[in-house]
Amino acid sequence: MNALIDDLQWRGLIAQSTDLESLSSDLDAGSLVYYIGFDPTAPSLHLGNLLQIQTMRRFQAHGHRPIALVGGATGLIGDPKMAGERTLNPVDVVADWGSRLRTELERFFDFDGPAAAQMVNNFDWTQDVDVIEFLRDIGKHFSVNRMLDREAVAARLAGDGISFTEFSYQVLQSFDYLQLFRSHDCRLQMGGSDQWGNITAGVDLIRRVEAAHVH
């Protein structure tokens, strides 16, 4: 097993993986591009982001190339939570918070050398998406049955329900991964355990659209 994987397991930082042995082999093979998304749902990073940032730094220290994604688009939607429907923040507020997050995130990564970090904002490739094209080219690859299995969605359906806005979040996050795969050859997405359904949906989308194996 790859030394970095061994270290992360020892630290208890790996809860789930789509294929840990394959990931280990890919890490051994050379520098891997990976990403984590940070939605601007508040004016600054919070304690819950620390573990993800530290994990990204560990990967970069081993020669792998991080992409920190600021969710300027997904932050306008909001990932479904069990407690109920989110209050949608104004567009200008989310844009301002996104700029602040970018400034804060830039402090944690090395932007020089062979493992140089990159910063992206998913608003850049989402703002001009054609709705019909998106539904035909991306939406057709998603099973509503599988989306309903997500714990937060199931909990909301058992209560007051969920809006289509929040229900579509998984599709948008998966689209992010597809875009980063195409533009940066990104082959690993990481996140908290609550993101597992979104992560695997992105992996599946890339497999279906690009016939590629990612993690």
Image (cartoon, grey):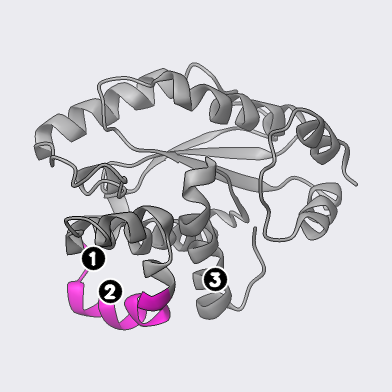
Residue 2: image location, x then y, percent: 87, 43
Task: Give me the residue at 54% from left, 62% from top.
Answer: 200
Residue type at tag 3:
Asp
Query: Label 1: how many residues lie within 10 Å, few (<14), some (14-19) or many (20+)?
Result: few
Question: Residue at coordinates 51% horizontally, 36% vertically from top-left?
Answer: 118
Confirm whether residue 180 shows in the render.
no
Marks 2 and 1: CB-CB under 8 Å? yes
Q: Position of residue 112 (x, y in %)?
A: 61, 26
Q: Is residue 203 above or below residue 86?
A: below
* Label 2 crowd bin: few (<14), some (14–19), many (20+), radius 10 Å: some
Where does label 3 land, which residue? 204
Q: Which residue is mark 1?
A: 129
The kind of secondary structure element at disc 3 is helix
Which amino acid type is marked by label 2? Answer: Phe
Mark-to-mark CA distance, 2 and 3: 17 Å
* Image mark count: 3
Instruction: Please tell me whether residue 185 belongs to the stretch shown in magenta.
Output: no
Q: Nearer the viewer, mark 2 or mark 1?
A: 2
* Span colored in magenta: 128-145
Q: Which mark is residue 34?
A: none
Q: CA distance from mark 2 to mark 1?
A: 7 Å
Q: CA distance from mark 3 to mark 1?
A: 21 Å
Mark 2–mark 3 CB contact (< 8 Å): no
Q: Earlier in the sequence, mark 3 or mark 1?
A: 1
Q: Quadrant of the C terminus?
A: bottom right
Q: Secondary structure at mark 1?
A: loop
Q: Is residue 88 above or below residue 213?
A: above
Question: In this figure, which residue is indicated by the disc labeled 2?
Answer: 134
Q: Where residue 33 sits: x, y (%)?
A: 63, 47
